[in-house]
Image (cartoon, helix red, strand yellow):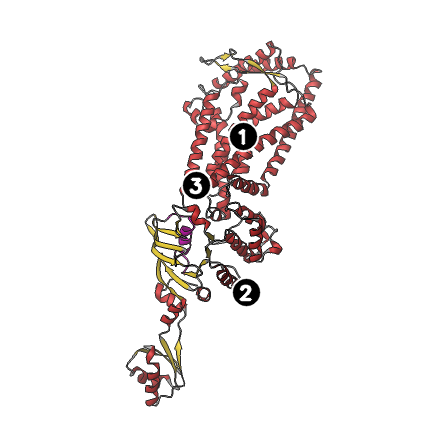
Amino acid sequence: MSNPSLIGLIRNEVLKIHRKRRLLVVSTILVVLVSMFTYANYRQIEKQREEQGTIDWRVDLQQEIIDTQNRLASANVQDEFRQILEFRVQQNQYYLDNDINPSYPGAPTFMRIFFSQGTTLVLPLFIIVLMADIVSGEHNDGTIKTLLSRPVRRFKILLAKWMTTLLYTSLLIFITAFVSYAISGIVLGWDGWTAPILTGFQASPTGTFSTDFVHTLPMWQYLLMSVGLAWFVVAAVGTIALMVSVVVKNTATGIGIMMAVLISGPLLTSLGSNWDSSKYLVNVNFGLHTYLEGQAPPIDGMTLPFSLVIITAWALAALGFAFYHFTQKDVY
Amino acid sequence: MQPTLKINQLSKVIGKKTIIDNISFDVFPGEVFGFLGPNGAGKTTTIRMIVGLIKPTKGTVSICGHNVEREFVQAMTQIGAIVENPELYKFLSGRENLEVFARMLPDVTEARIQEVIDLVDLTARIDDKVKTYSLGMRQRLGIAQALLNNPRVLILDEPTNGLDPMGIRDLRLFIRRLVEETGLSVLVSSHILAEIELLADRVAIMSRGKIVKVGTVQDLINELASTVDIHVPDSFEALPVVRGFESVTQADVVDERTIRVSMNLEDTARLNRYLLERDVAVSGLERRVQTLEELFITLTGGDHIV
């Protein structure tokens, strides 16, 4: 193995992040969050049991369908939202007709919901906490001068930093999966890995609900896909955060920019289904789980492959710009 | 002898401002080269170009024959540097810092790391976090880092900043010993003349982005010694007599008993006889060595210096 090797450089980056105890902070927040959600979930089940004297999911689902239909009946529902609600009614009806419980009680279902909800905001936020100062921190400390005057090409240094970003993305996803399973399992039970779940609902080309491609998957397989999508989004956010860290020398400013990017995504989706071309923005595409779950896409014409391509394109552009900036610019 | 560091017609233009204006100088093996100039003269910018942090607009820097821009890795293998401050990871221990930078170099062994730790005398505190170090210790750790790869060229930018007089003396002795033992070249930048005068073999004086003078310290001192102070019982009475001597170009009263004379120094003895013949009781003749500081003000046109 040649020395200086890429592995050595990655070890350096891991040591720096490790000593700043960032992963510990993120893991602690995760444990607190998951504990809170688990408790909330537990209270909800208790309440149901008290009110209905049963925890039959069929009764539950039927009730939810009726509730949603009531909402649809009221006049002041926006058109975009109406479509989402109609999808939900039809989907739930489909579950009911096929006698499949969409939220089979247990830790795997908790994980499914946590990853689905966490991918757009919480998990990207964590990777930003971990990675925001990976380059700008070297500027703040002045260590960039020592780092870049050693006999290693700048290209290789940034490559090591990017690979560290991907490594921490994987670690973060793994820890999230572990924590959400371990903690929720205590209350909700550990099984449910093989419970069937439906996927493949989609909007037909005419924009209406379609069940043509629906198929059943065991939970573990569905979860694997879900976690994969989460990894993809978090890795993309990490890559964009790396670019911001290269370009914006001040870490606090960098975090602010990344937060704005993240938060404006859901905001744009809820406001902007009339602004059609906003679907080409990267942050509008982070909700990959809507495709898996078969909800109506935020903007017409968005599909899973479309979103994957958009995210990949933005991440690659960010990476290219980061490498250009890092290798070409003067360091003061 | 081949220079270890060759600066050739180097310029840096930022926007419309010329920060570094066509400078050239060589540093040779076994030499301590002083790089002198007021704050803002362009010393640090030059050093940043030497270590490849910024790109020259024109000209080249070569380290042991390797062009810094084209053969960056080979050039950096031969150099160790502290740019401005010893910039190290404060949240890591001293040893971890050295290990981090060792992994960026070819073939640095554990033994070599221990060797540089012993060399800069940090053994006792090496496993403490750098944020607990004093400035002097950080400076030493910075030097240890710069020496890890056995460089042919060591660059120290304002190394005495924040050191107490003992620390400055220790550093000076350390650099001298290092040069004698390893034969490397050291480039030391400073805005404090006294420091460079004691440490360097040769100096380059920089002002407003230009090199105004390069020479050995001895050359500079010889050049400076061009005035003589004459001690007499009564300066005012003796002044016209002194001015009457042929090779005196200028003579002024310093105080009641001293006259300062600019003249050809070879004629000092004749001036003495001349005065005695005219009943001026000379009680002392003193060849006056101007300090580097005074020369500096003359050369740089009174740039602000410390």
Q: In this picture, is B130 found above or below A292?
A: below
Q: Residue at x 57, y 54 (%)?
A: B115
Q: CA distance from mark 3 to mark 1?
A: 28 Å
Which chain does tag 2 point to?
A: B
Instruction: Tell me the residue that label 2 is attached to.
Output: B166
Instruction: Tell me the residue that label 1 is attached to.
Output: A121
Q: Amino acid at mark 1?
A: Leu
Q: CA distance from mark 2 to mark 1?
A: 56 Å
On residue A326, the disc is 3
Query: Could you say which is closer to the camera, residue A77 or residue A53?
Result: A53
Query: Residue A254: x and y, percent?
Result: 48, 39
Q: Which residues are magenta?
A: B36-55
Q: Are marks 3 and 1 on the same chain?
A: yes
- Check whether the beta carbons of the residues at disc 2 and disc 1 lie within 8 A of each other: no
- The stretch drawn in magenta includes residue B50: yes
- Check whether the beta carbons of the residues at disc 3 and disc 1 lie within 8 A of each other: no
Query: Residue A238: x and y, percent?
Result: 51, 34
